[in-house]
Image (spheres, grey):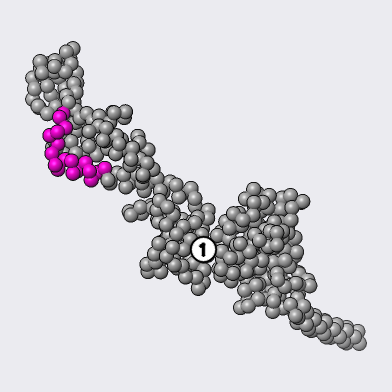
Amino acid sequence: MTKELCFVIDQISREKGISRDALLKVLEAALLSAVRKRFGGRTNIDLRIDPKTCAIQAYETKTIVEQVENRNEEITPEEAAAYTPDGKPGDTVELPIPLHDLGRIAAQTAKQVIFQRVREAERDIIYEEFKDKIGHIVSGTVLRKEKNIYYVSLGKTEAVLSQRDTLPNETLKRGDIVKAYLSEVRQTSKGPAIILSRTDPNFIVGLFKMEVPEINDGVVVIKGIAREPGERTKIAVYSKDSSIDAVGACVGMKGTRVQSIVRELRGERIDIIPWSDDPRIFIARALTPSTVDRVGINEDEKTAMVIADDQQLSLAIGKRGQNIKLATKLTGWEIEILSESEYSKIKMEETDRSLDRAIIETRQSKSNES
């Protein structure tokens, strides 16, 4: 029996990834619960399992007294002599309990508690393992889709990927291998809930860390990111080493690194922008793929006025204003764009108004003199 028990414990330990000592404690607690239930819930009953042989010993602790009033908790010196020859009144003695008399109900109780405790231990292990992976990219296999939620196998457990957290027009099929950003892990009554996302901007950051060793090593730093999932992403990078081109490192030889990421994102466009601590330069670069002529800033209000060539204006603004919106998110500056012709017109109007004011002031001056 003890050999079989040891074999079962070792097998469960390997299959479930739970330590042998933890399983022995679970089993002790389960059997103790069954034994106490069999004997009316008496708290002076205890149980232990030998960690080496898996031998189970149940016993009851009684106090030695001259006159027994409670047979469940007390014993006479004469009765105790069989177990402890030197025992005297006031001492306690442990009396073995035969386990073969536990009965079917007690055995069933022990079985239920063991399974429950094993499930709880599994849940705790999974929670602790994936809690440390929050903020990382994980890869899994799509199992099924229910009510706009994809269930993704991560090996030991399942994660959930909501339809709204997938890329626009992206349809995943059963068996697809998918990468996603692990955004949250929380405990629930049914076990750990592992939440994935493919739309979080940090998903892009994680992909770049995987593809670009310089970022993973900390030589190239991602200073900011702005994203419209499925459409366009702008990412600002900076190199701590002047000999390393941050943008070139992210693009890779013949664009291999960034193209790998673009394929994962189903063709989402990525603008890799060299970061600058000069807001004028940074704002101009953030409006890539357009080129701008001038940038004026108001540092107090953190606003910027950008002047672009008439041919570059629509490119700077982007489709549905997407380019300027992403540039605003990336830089943290409120950006307004004017074409050269609009700017010239405004300057001309301002000049005309200034001339008008000058003429009026001159006339008033002459009138006062007369």
**Residue under label 1:** 198
Position in image of residue 62 (x %, y %):
16, 24
Q: Is residue 9 visible in the rendered structure shown here? A: yes
Nearest the eye: 344 or 167: 167
Q: What residue appears at the point 52 percent right and 65 percent down from the top-left corner?
A: 199
Q: Going by the picture, which residue comes out furthest to the top?
A: 86
Quadrant, the N terminus: top left
Magenta span covers which residues?
Answer: 97-114
Quarter of the picture containing the C terminus is bottom right
Say if the magenta span includes residue 100.
yes
User: Which residue is more in the foreground, 236 or 211?
Assistant: 211
In the image, is residue 13 above or below residue 325? Answer: above
Residue at 65% across / 49% down in the picture? 218
Left-right relation of 149 to 81: right
* Relative image position of residue 254 (x, y in whole percent): 70, 62
Image x and y of residue 350, in percent = 79, 81
SS majority, magenta: helix
- On screen, 229 above or below 344? above
Residue 339: quadrant of the picture: bottom right
Q: Nearer the viewer, residue 261 or 290?
A: 261
The three-letter amino acid code for the residue at tag 1 is Arg
Task: Kindly identify the residue that appears in the image at 22 percent across and 35 percent down.
Answer: 32
Alpha-carbon neighbours of circle 1 within 10 Å: few (<14), some, or many (≥20)?
A: many
102 inside magenta stretch:
yes
Relative horizontal placement of residue 222, taking residue 265 as reference (left or right): right
